[in-house]
Amino acid sequence: MPRRETIALPSLAPGTSRTVTAFHYGTRGARPKAYIHASLHADELPGMMCAAHLRPLLDKAEAEGRITGEIILVPVANPIGLAQTLNGHPMGRFAFEDPGTNFNRDWPDLTEACATLLQGATPTVETVRAALKSAVAELPDATENEVHRKTLLTWSIDADYVLDMHCDGESLAHIYGLDEQEADVADLAAWIGAPVVLMENFGSKGSFDACNSGPWQYLRDRLGVLNLPAACFAVTVEFRGQADVSDTLGAADAAGVFGFLTARGIISGDAGKRPNTVGGIGPLDGTDVLKASRSGVVAWQIDLGSHVKAGDVIAEIIDPLADDPTNARTPVVTQASGVFFARTPDRLARPGCSLGKVFGKVPLTHRKTGTLLEN
């Protein structure tokens, strides 16, 4: 059976407490190491359902002695956000205690701390991992949020593979990854059936996946060691939309993750035939984020998965107070040619809010390189 580790977070008030729990499989320190967690945005539950179905698969593999590496699974990555509700609705994307802070933003950049620790040492995979672990150990841990983040990084920072499982509002499954790891990202996308893969040259700083993978890229320039490999494969996996939570989907997602881990040698045995072909791969800068220019009721004109071209109308915003609401419609037009893959479940538009996303394979001039698609 796996080793269960539960870390207590600092209490916000007398009589209250929260914990974060990890399940450890295989041998501590064995390679390859995989770290997987679900629902860092705590109101995004498809990853949690995947984890619930992945645990029995890992339990069986552990009992059969098939965990050749080390696997750490955190089924509930954000107990802080999971406890947040407003008017009966879960609010797990932003922290109430630190208003405006996105749970998957503002993660530390460990590059400089790691570079300082490596002074005088040969920057190898082993020495960089040791420096990263030391840098995490020095992070502040006074508040609940600080201990929460430090705990997750303590488990993940030296992993070969990091899977951060999220979802969008309403969407097709998709993955965010790094250009130099395209083969692995594409392989994972095929295992889990994600038709859209969004790639960056350098990870957008501030997210959990970039906190784990970014230092390997940035240390090359900082230390002048151009042959240092990107030894941490860290990706954000978006398992469709918030309402796509079912045993059927969770079991399929878990089987895909398990197949990927087996194909990577973390679990021994035959991974079986990869169930899907590789979907569309394109630059993150090729994704057009559709914005509302005014307030009103959103009327989508096409379905998710539709292929579109630049200039197509994706939605219309209706002014319900107009003299003729039938004709008082403001079109929402895409600047990308590709696949309409994500949209908000909110049908009330507000000026400047994000409504949806179109995946394209050509970088867009209005997109700023190195930035995430939304907060």
Image: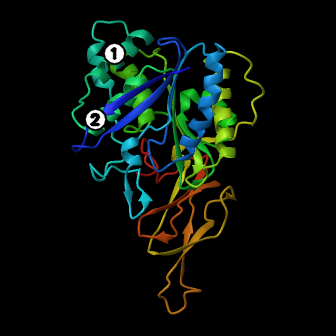
- How is the protein colored in the picture? rainbow
Q: Amino acid at mark 2?
A: Glu
Residue 66 point in image, percent of width and height: 65, 15
**Residue 186 in view here:** no
Closest to the observer: 67 or 83?
Answer: 83
Q: Amino acid at mark 1?
A: Ala
Calculate the distance from the C-alpha at mark 1 to the C-alpha at mark 2.
20 Å
Q: Residue furthest right?
A: 273
**Residue 188 in view here:** yes
Nearest to N terminus: mark 1 or mark 2: 1
Q: Quadrant of residue 223?
A: top left
326 lies above or below 207: below
Q: For numbered disc 1, what is the local secondary structure?
A: helix
Q: Quadrant of residue 308?
A: bottom right
Residue ID for mark 1: 131
Residue 27 point in image, percent of width and height: 52, 12
**Dot 2 surroundings within 10 Å: few (below 14), some, or many (20 or more)?**
some
367 lies above or below 129: below
275 lies above or below 26: below
Decide if residue 118 is on the left or right side of residue 235.
left
Residue 367 point in image, percent of width and height: 46, 51
> What's the residue at 66%, 21% (across, down)?
262
Q: Which label sits on residue 146? A: 2
Closest to the observer: 212 or 19?
Answer: 19
Closest to the observer: 154 or 189?
Answer: 154
> What's the residue at 36%, 13% (across, down)?
130
> What's the residue at 33%, 35% (across, down)?
148
